[in-house]
Image (tube, rainbow, N blue to C red):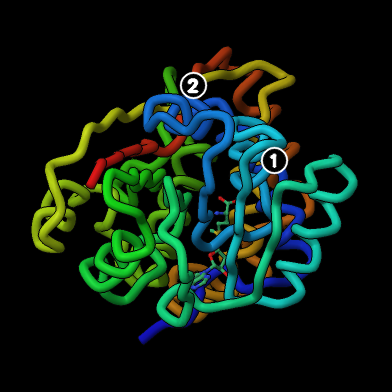
Amino acid sequence: MPGYVFGHSAQELERLMFQAQVLAPITSRLISLMGITPGMRVLDLGCGAGDVSMLVAQAVGESGSVIGIDLDADTVALAQYRAQLARLPQIQFQACAIDAYTSAEGFDAVIGRYIMLHQADPQTFLHKAASLLRPGGVLGLHEIAIQAPMLESHPEVPLWQQAGTWLFEALNAGARSPGAAGCMLGHLAEAGLPSPEQFCERPIGGGADALFYRWAAEAVRTLMPHLIRLGVLDDGVVPLNTLEHRLRKATVQARAQLLGPTQVCAWVRL
Ligand SMILES: C[S@@+](CC[C@H](N)C(=O)[O-])C[C@H]1O[C@@H](n2cnc3c(N)ncnc32)[C@H](O)[C@@H]1O
């Protein structure tokens, strides 16, 4: 069974923080729709560098509290440092695996972004997440759909679409549950949870200033060892240092409109 496909290198943590800028408007919408309001106590599963926890902290205010948990102790230390810099004392982070986490008191809300796809068994994960809620609490998930084509462009920019194929190949093989976003409703039903409310959207954009080029290039860079291991690419075939620049140049020259990966958000109230 594959481990956590992205790893926790310094470069990967930087990538997560940059990716968070692209995803923030979508996650913020989920936070609002799932009804996270001032004073609530919220748990962030697989918090990474703390970006979702920080969005939630703004929603719950100083009268609320957020706990972010992640497998990796260095990642958690970075998240704690960032929360201090952002003057968000209502967040605490803890290095802990989701299946080992316990709390004497149920949470008003449990949230996770890009986390279910990395779990071996979505049903077990959802059971655990729901068990951490108080009666009437709400569970919200923001997942990325691992389905081809992950990236599109109009008119077609071959390098952009190629990058989408690489990302699809690496994540489809490397994520433990790559179909998680596409089967959200079914997984929740199998876990004995109510039907969710849902929305999905795709980031869209183009032009010289779009965040897309760096987002895609950094993801390809992190996943390159897996692409080589899978035999999709040979070492050194893709000049990674210039990939962002080449994506930007080709897109701007073609005046292309880019579509990013589909984002699926779902929430259920117990
Ligand atoms: C793709 S990152 C997403 C981080 C963050 N949620 C975000 O959107 O910026 C997934 C994170 O989940 C953590 N993770 C994966 N499986 C986990 C588990 N079973 N228990 C705790 N953390 C986990 C990884 O260490 C990683 O930091």
Q: Quadrant of ligand 1?
A: bottom right
Residue 247 in view (yes/no): no
Secondary structure at badge 2 equals strand
Name the residue at the bottom extreme: 1
Query: Which residue matches tag 1?
Result: 214
- Residue 71: quadrant of the picture: bottom right
Secondary structure at badge 1 equals helix
Kind of residue at disc 1: Arg
Q: Is mark 1 within 8 Å of ligand 1?
A: no
Q: Mark number for residue 204? A: 2
Q: Report how far apart the C-alphas of labels 1 and 2 lie in the structure.
A: 14 Å
From this view, report whether residue 120 is shown above or below residue 224: below
From this view, report whether residue 157 is shown above or below residue 238: above
- Residue 60: quadrant of the picture: top right
Q: Residue at x 67, y 30 (%)?
A: 211
Q: Earlier in the sequence, mark 1 or mark 2?
A: 2
Q: Residues within 10 Å of mark 1 (few under 14, many from 20)?
A: some
From this view, report whether residue 2 is shown above or below residue 162: below
Kind of residue at disc 2: Ile
The N terminus, quarter of image: bottom left
- Residue 214: quadrant of the picture: top right
Q: Nearer the viewer, residue 178 or 38?
A: 38
From this view, report whether residue 258 is shown above or below residue 148: above
Q: Is residue 140 left or right of residue 104?
A: left
Q: Is residue 254 left or right of residue 26?
A: right
Q: Residue at x 65, y 48 (%)?
A: 217
